[in-house]
Amino acid sequence: MRKQIAAANWKMNLTYQEGEKLLDDIFDAGTSLAPHQHAIFAVPYPYLIMTRSEVAEEFNYHVAAQNCHHKKSGAYTGEVSVDMLQSIGVHYCIVGHSERREYNAETNAMLADKVNLCQENGITPIFCCGEPLDIREAGTQNEFVAAQLRESLFHLPAARIKGIIIAYEPIWAIGTGRTASTAQAQEMHHFLRSVIADHYGKDIADEIPILYGGSVKANNAEELFSSPDVDGGLVGGASLVAADFTAIISALK
Ligand code: PEP
């Protein structure tokens, strides 16, 4: 079975102590994962080492960075490189979250560089894509999202694309409480898998986890994840509450 993943994106929330307590509360709940299920915590940089130590005790729980720089090293004050992440044992990194695309002017070409650097350092990119509201209202979301994949991922050889996790996150659903319907999520995920299949073949497309992100909550996760092409979720707000994220992990197929 394809990997099923619940990924928490804490964004710029929680103090170190609050983050540590949240992890403790989640692990105290004792939610165990099947071999094909994974939970990933994308935490702020200063909490990566603490979180890595906490997840090391748990089966199939992992830590992720929320971003990395698109250059290998150099005079980029305040930035964090992929080499740095690798050197502290981080094996996952969110790439291209819509908030970074918007507030940090990240382009598809820049994200292709980040994907390359991550993979060269043994870090799995969680590649985010998704359309803004005006594109959804114009009905051109498929073309928009397919172009994001093409321009940031389709330079990869087949052996490399298999190592990507994709998160489809319609921007109009992020942090708004307005979730895509189960049908809308399944339709887009099925379309994305077909775009990958056209380029790399069906076997490879069938291996790649595609997560849904956008107001996933404890009370809608099970329905969203039940769709055949939805392989879990990337979760913002609800990942900050232990009981809610635990319920979302439990909703994985
Ligand atoms: C996100 O940050 O990727 C996200 C989907 O946030 P939320 O769950 O709060 O909509």
Image (spheres, grey):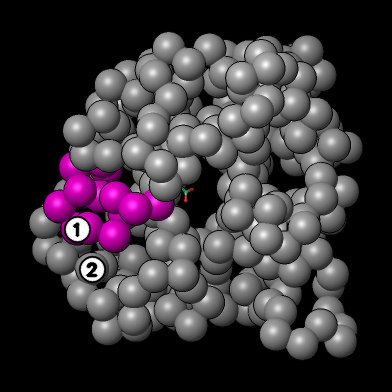
Q: Residues within 10 Å of mark 2 (few under 14, many from 20)?
A: some
Q: Is residue 240 magenta?
A: yes
Quadrant of residue 73 in the image?
bottom right
| 29 with respect to 145 (left or right) | left
Q: Position of residue 88 (x, y in %)?
A: 56, 79
Mark 1 residue CB less than 8 A from any atom of ligand 1: no
The answer to whether residue 138 shows anywhere in this view is yes
Relative height, residue 250 to residue 112 (above, below): above
Image quadrant where one finds the N terminus: top left
| 192 with respect to 210 (left or right) | right
Q: Which segment is the magenta one?
A: 236-249
Mark count: 2
Image quadrant where one finds the C terminus: top left
**Amino acid found under the numbered disc labelled 2:** Leu
| 33 with respect to 119 (left or right) | left
Residue in front for this viewpoint, 238 or 126: 238
Q: CA distance from mark 2 to mark 1?
A: 6 Å
Q: Label 1: state its secondary structure.
A: helix
Residue drawn at point x = 77 percent, y = 55 percent: 106
Q: Which residue in the protein does label 1 denote? A: 242
Say whether marks 2 and 1 touch (CB < 8 Å): yes
Relative height, residue 169 to residue 118 (above, below): above
**Amino acid found under the numbered disc labelled 1:** Ala
Q: Which residue in the protein does label 2 denote? A: 22
Quadrant of residue 217 in the image?
top left
